[in-house]
Image (cartoon, coloured by chain):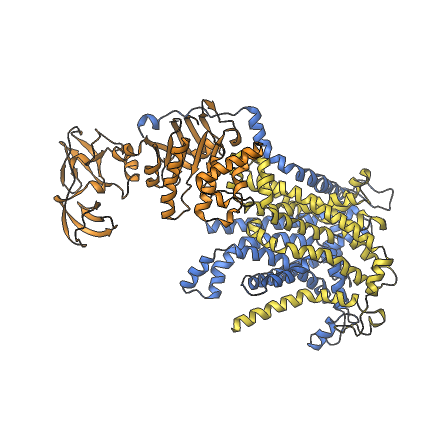
Amino acid sequence: MATMEIRSARKTYGTLCVLEDINLSIGDGEFIVLVGPSGCGKSTLLRMIAGLEEISAGEIRIEDRVVNDLPPKARDIAMVFQSYALYPHMNVADNMSYSLRLRKADKPTIADKVRDASAKLGLGALLERKPKALSGGQRQRVAMGRAIVRQPKAFLFDEPLSNLDARLREQMRAEIRKLHRALGATSIYVTHDQVEAMTLADRIVAMHGGHIQQVGTPLELYDRPANLFVAGFIGSPGMNFVEGAVELGTFVMRDGTRLPLPEGMPETLGGATLGIRPEHVTLGEGLAAEVELVEPTGHGIILHLRLAGAVFRVLTTDRRWLTPGDQVQVGLPAGALHLFDESEQRVAPAPHPQQ
Amino acid sequence: MLKTIAHRVAILCFIAFSLFPLFWLLKVSVTPNDLLYSEGVRLWPSRVTLDHFSFVLANSEFPRFFGNSLIVSGTTAVCTTILAALMGYALSRFRFRGKLWLAGLLLVTQMFPLVMLVAPIFKILAPLGLTNSLAGLIVVYTAFNVPFASFLMQGFFDGIPPDLEEAAMIDGADRFTAFRQIILPLGLPGIAATLGFVFTAAWSEMIFALMLISGNDKATFPVGLLSFVSKFSVDYGQMMAAGVLALIPACLFFLMIQRYLVQGMTAGAVKG
Amino acid sequence: MSDSVLHHVAPDRYRRPLRQRVASVIEPWLYCAPVLVIIVAVMFVPLVLGVSYAFRDIQLLNPFSGGFVGLDHFRALGQDDAFFRALRNTLWWTGASVFLQLGFGLILALLLNVPFAGRGLAQALVFLPWAVPTFLAGLNWAWLFNPVIGPLPHWMTALGLMDEPSNILADPSIAMWGPIIAAVWWGIPFFAITLLAALQSIPKDLYEAASIDGASPWQQFRSITLPFLAPVIAITVLLRTVWVANFADLIIVMTNGGPADRTQTVASYIFTQAFKRLDFGYASAVALVLLALLLAYSMVILVLRQRLSDRDK
């Protein structure tokens, strides 16, 4: 396994810059998730690490060796593709052993490793099958098997679960996590799904518009998003935002509604945005709001409220009978508030979430 | 219902139009000489004979022409397909300066008036000893067929996801290994289609065969067949029998590959 | 991002070692090299030579020929009525052949795009003419048009298209139809195959959406099928026109330009000049004019196609 270091990496196509100044250190055995909306550059970054895309500037190191000039085969990494990219003309065993055969491993070694990997993934009975005779989940497993037989320095995953249905995705997510714990392999995982990112990652790298927005543990990103983008992207349903300004330690919404801020926040701030997660909003005492939509989730309900002229979502396990048009009062606990300045950056101390 | 009937009838019309000339070829080839004119317009002669076939096979030089054609068309098909596979792969997978220019170059070759090139080609091949030789024909046919075959192969490769060779490269293959071990096996239908396409084209070619070959021992089928026409007494029965024999390999080949042609072009060959 | 990052000075562009940069530039050309070598050697070099012939006096049987004659051939060409007649015939021959091949090919492709029992077999049978060697197709059709040994004149008489069974290849006013029919027979499969391939790549849900929107089959054809096929049709017609215009085999085999030069096209005229009269200089001059015309035609089609696809965007 290996450490990885990305320094000032950049990717341009002609004059179009898709990745700008990427810096990232990855520890040995760490599970890193690159997350962001489509077009944010996360897949390009992964492909640069794999050697499938050239690096326009900067450098990428694997175990202190600069790999910019190395072709994929010399980087000793494995990759699981979104499409799985199983070789259709080879059966499962041949798919998994292709890399070993290319490296001229001897037959007993190949057989051993394929048997090990297929046992880990429960593929033992399928070794003779061609990919087209496998279900989506089985193909996904073969793709993973192909990666682990090699015992590479690092695993790269390019949205490996996005072609599976929701139930299977959940199951495979858990398996990937377990597998990572068992193998302890350095892994980089690309996804646009923030739930996958939260559940899998040791550290999340949130990306947007070709820049890294924030790097941190899942809870760091959830509790202390560095900017509006991260705040809105992490968490589901997404964080509520209200625009306004800070005057004399209180937040003044556009319609004049005032909201006290906790200690340590700036006294004045023009053009600020206040954020609060739907699960931190309390029903009961507080600001008046009107129910616009009720979405039961089974576990609880998501209420869409109109509050101070903005749409506001509340996640509650309280199964109170509400219908659109009802008036409610909501509390915005000071400790759960996030404040962002005009340039969309987080300001002031990290409030601790409500327990 | 009415629509279905109209559809089937239309299909039958096309089939009849396609097959009737071939049927006529067969009919003449089995008509005895004495009935050739008296029953010239009958759909099937009152007596049939295989004499023409046995004569052509036993007493004429057709077996040799047949063999020559087989060698020339077969070798041309293989050479062209190999070259076109490489070229098609480059057009399909690489982004490089001059690619558009290259594709334009291939397109332009399709416009060259063949007859304008015959004399210069003869002049270039003569000192190399490639006139009146099957090898010379193979070289010329390969050159003339390779542009379209390249576009065809490009289309087939466009239909193979690039993920596969990227996976192979990460697995430890260099690009050429990935091409040989992953892309080519998956492109087999396309390769079959291209082989068949080039084979039939080479099998039909007449002008170069006439111009570059002078002796009977190197003549290909079309040349041999035309020599029947130029004789004083044309034996139509024998000529048509020879024609039927000439059709067999081309048609067999074509029947095998035609569905791959449609498949492959679906993948993008004809999108320009 | 913070200001410091926004104004970050980009690091110098990463330069790979020279050897690698050269290798990556060369790599695609290695795949193209064999094809390039052979088409340059067997097509472009002869083309240049052929172009030079157009300005020289090249007659195979005349040992004193070979001198430079400048534009003499082109001057002669300007006064050669046979050439202009051939040019008109070429337009007629190419236009009619390609138009009919496209029309019938499109109909056939649409018919084959409907699933039915035995489609595979039907498809194989209707595509078969493509595999027939052209000289054989020519001979065979010449035979079919012959009133003594072919049925077509009798059928046409029975249908009232003809007063008495006669050979249309011998009638100057309609002789061109002979090679055209043979060319259409031989060429339908090419169009049908390419158009069928294009039809099968049209997403089915487009038709479903259109029929839910209440579009009639004809409206669907006009608003979905045709726009999808247009680029394919453009490129196929372009290639086919060029091939047919250059294609002399059928005419040489069936009519040899006759009767009374009524089926003489530029391609068959070049063939006659070169191989019957052995005047390669003049033949090359004619061929050069044909090449120029075809290039001009292709440019027009490609520009039109570009316009069309730009308009769609």
Q: Colour of chain A?
A: orange
Which residue is farthest left?
A285
Residue at the image point whose x is 74% and y is 58% from the top = B247
Of residues B125 and A334, the one drawn nearer to the viewer in this rendering: A334
- On screen, A311 above or below A40? below
Instruction: Tell me where residue A68 appears, x and y as whole percent.
Output: 49, 27
**Is residue C87 in view from this perspective?**
no
- Location of residue C155 by image quarter: bottom right
**Is residue A222 in view from this perspective?**
yes
Instruction: Tell me where residue A301 appears, x and y as whole percent.
Output: 22, 49
Spot the blue chain and give its letter.
Answer: C
- On screen, B39 above or below C176? below
Which residue is farthest top?
A64
- On screen, C250 above or below A118? below
> Does residue A40 appear to the left or right of A87 in the view shown?
left
Instruction: Tell me where residue C297 appears, x and y as whole percent.
Output: 62, 51
Q: How many marks?
A: 0
Spot the yellow chain and give its letter.
Answer: B
Residue at the image point whose x is 62% and y is 48% from the top = C296
Instruction: Tell me where residue C203 appears, x and y as whole percent.
Output: 48, 55
